[in-house]
Amino acid sequence: MKHILIGGAWPYANGSLHIGHIAALLPGDALARYYRAKGDNVIYVSGSDCYGTPITVRAAREQKSPAEIAAHYHREFCEVFQKLGFSYDCYTCTTDPHHTSFVQDFHRNLYESAYVAPKTVKTAYCPRCQKLLTDRLVTGLCPVCQAPTRGDQCDACGEILEPNALFSPHCATCNTPLEFREASELYLLVTKLEPQLRAFWATCPHWRKNAAAFTKRYLDEGLRDRAITRDLDWGIPVPKEGFEDKKIYIWAENVLGYLSAAARVCAERGIDLAEVFGDNARHYYVHGKDNIPFHTIILPALLLAEGHPWRLPDDIVSSEHLTLEGKKISTSGNWAIWARELVERFHPDSIRYFFFANGPEKRDGDFSWREFQERNNSELVGAWGNLVNRTLAFITKYLGRTIPSGKLDPALRQTVETAFDEIGTLIERASLRDALAEAFELVRAGNKFYDAHEPWKTRTADPQACDDAIFSCTWLIANLATLLHPFLPTSSQEILDRLNLRPQWTPQTIAQGAPLPDCPILFSRIDLPENRK
């Protein structure tokens, strides 16, 4: 048994989740369900990122406190994830006292290392607003690509920035040109860690290509030391004398949520956290393309600097971008599909299937209503649902609701045994689209098997041949439900429950002569209005 840590990116609690968030985060749940079925100790964690400037800006606009805004969206996130079947072992938030305590302890150790030092820096000040500005309240032009950007990270090229590096920096609130005043901040000396970070990058074969390429670019362009404290009102207090009036910069505490949440799960299970970060472990970090540097540079730098023998990320599962009907998703422009609305209207597995089969795994993906409808109707209803319904309905109508005593087709057995190995290998590599496609090849093979053996004819002409065919199809369905469980857990569990099985990653056996409870229609057709096609 291995320790499998799966960290899903922490969505920012300043607005609702949209389909881009769901597409990026779903791979984590498939990985967690697969490794649990294998019998490993899975710790699947995430949470809501509840600090930061956008939350305070929204709070001021809505005349609420930042805590109220963060709590509202945290509750909404929990509801969406629950309805979509996300199986987190711990979904928490950065305002949780456990996280605060863990982060402050981590930072106390960090400050004792040779990789943290105070620096006198220039801090953005707006003379019109008469206040110091956080990085996200600074706008200007990116010094790398010259695109308009905020002061923390360029959306166009992905560069991590400092506000005083921007060309023509202005206040995002009132557009006033900024002044820069001196202040003392604690810095993580990332430049001193470059040899370790470069060696880490060179020995990581399980990263998505975009993560490997982006990280190489950051390394080749030269790393920069990063501020880990800020003059903020909303955040985790800095646990160091002389800096008590400052807060920990969110990038230096939110990525530690993977550790704090894992520590909570370990305490509940009576497991030493050091074991989960030891040699008998594998760690996956699942997120969108924009978050790559925080998981391949920032998080490893923090872990290396703190001094304990933390395990560095093994697998970086970073998605590409998702567009909507061919256009970039824009929450400010209201060009988005909100996850809370999607889960209210459609079967969770219809949503999950689309994003596993059509999501931005290796290249940018696009969501279109026409494609969503077609995927559901042709593949879930027309292929998988058809195999299940025609087989189990046959048992109900003609075989007394009892699984027949039949001989399992040997070629089918061999195909399924091979599928468990091949699909499992693909899932472990986070090649989830290919894994799902291979499972659906088996679905299509099952429908061809059913048609070729014509049980509607052999029922009277050759009853034993009929029993053999229906038993083989039922056995195949049991195994397909197991293979598909990481991707389509709600519908798969309905089948496994009726066959008295659990999702274990091994070829299943079914009891001949066992009663078969009614199995509902798994999926319904989606018929969208013409203006949605």
Image (tube, grey):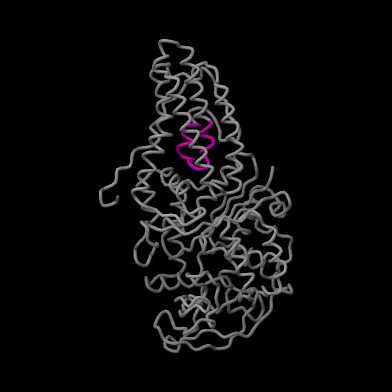
Q: For residue 228, which quarter of the picture?
A: bottom right
Q: For residue 73, which quarter of the picture?
A: bottom left
Q: Is residue 52 above or below residue 365?
A: below
Left/right of residue 203 with respect to residue 70 in the rendered view: right
Q: Which image quarter is the N terminus in? A: top right
Span highlighted in magenta in the image: 479-496
Residue furthest left in the image: 530
Q: For residue 39, which quarter of the picture?
A: top right
Residue 212 is one of the magenta-drawn residues:
no
Left/right of residue 161 with respect to residue 82 in the rendered view: right
Q: Foreground residue, 218 or 380?
A: 218
Image coordinates of residue 361 in percent, x first then y, are: 51, 53
Image coordinates of residue 233 in percent, x first then y, are: 51, 76
Number of marks present in the image shown: 0
Left/right of residue 226 with respect to residue 370 in the rendered view: right
Mark yes or no: residue 98 visible.
no
Residue furthest top in the image: 461
x 42%, y 16%: residue: 400
Residue 485 is one of the magenta-drawn residues:
yes
Image coordinates of residue 300 in percent, x first then y, are: 66, 64
Main secondary structure along the magenta-highlighted residues: helix
Left/right of residue 301 with respect to residue 91 in the rendered view: right
x 58%, y 79%: residue: 245
Image coordinates of residue 249 in percent, x first then y, are: 57, 73
Q: Foreground residue, 470 or 80?
A: 470
Mark yes or no: residue 69 visible.
yes
